[in-house]
Image (cartoon, helix red, strand yellow):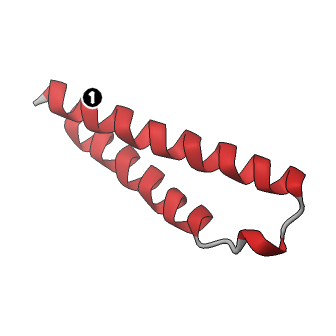
């Protein structure tokens, strides 16, 4: 059951990462660019953490 939870969370973070990556950063001000970069990094790290947890639960 944990394995399915970890995979679900991984795919959610991947989806969110793709959504955030499609935003055109040329039209944004510096403050929003910084916030966007932080969100992208968070979802990237979270996806990697769930991959590791999925491997450990197998």
**Could you tell me which quadrant the N terminus lies in?**
top left
Q: Position of residue 18 (x, y in %)?
A: 50, 65
Residue 49, by quadrant, is top left
Please tell me whether residue 52 is drawn above or below residue 11 in the rendered image.
above
Q: Where is residue 15 in the image (x, y as percent from the top left)?
A: 46, 62
Residue at 77% across / 47% down in the picture?
35
Q: In this view, does 14 lie to the left or right of 42?
A: left
**Could you tell me which quadrant the C terminus lies in?**
top left
Q: Where is residue 40 in the image (x, y as percent from the top left)?
A: 59, 50
- Label 1 element class: helix
5, 29: nearer the viewer:
29
Q: Name the residue under label 1.
A: 53
Residue at 77% across / 48% down in the picture?
34
Q: Where is residue 12 in the image (x, y as percent from the top left)?
A: 44, 54
47, 8: nearer the viewer:
47
Residue at 47% across / 45% down in the picture?
44
Q: In this view, does 54 lie to the left or right of 9?
A: left
Q: In this view, does 44 lie to the left or right of 55?
A: right
């Amino acid at each position: 059951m944990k394995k399915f939870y970890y995979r679900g969370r991984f795919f959610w973070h991947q989806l969110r990462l793709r959504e955030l990556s499609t935003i055109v950063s040329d039209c944004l001000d510096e403050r929003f660019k910084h916030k966007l970069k932080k969100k992208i990094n968070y979802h990237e790290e979270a996806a990697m953490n769930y991959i590791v947890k999925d491997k450990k639960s197998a």
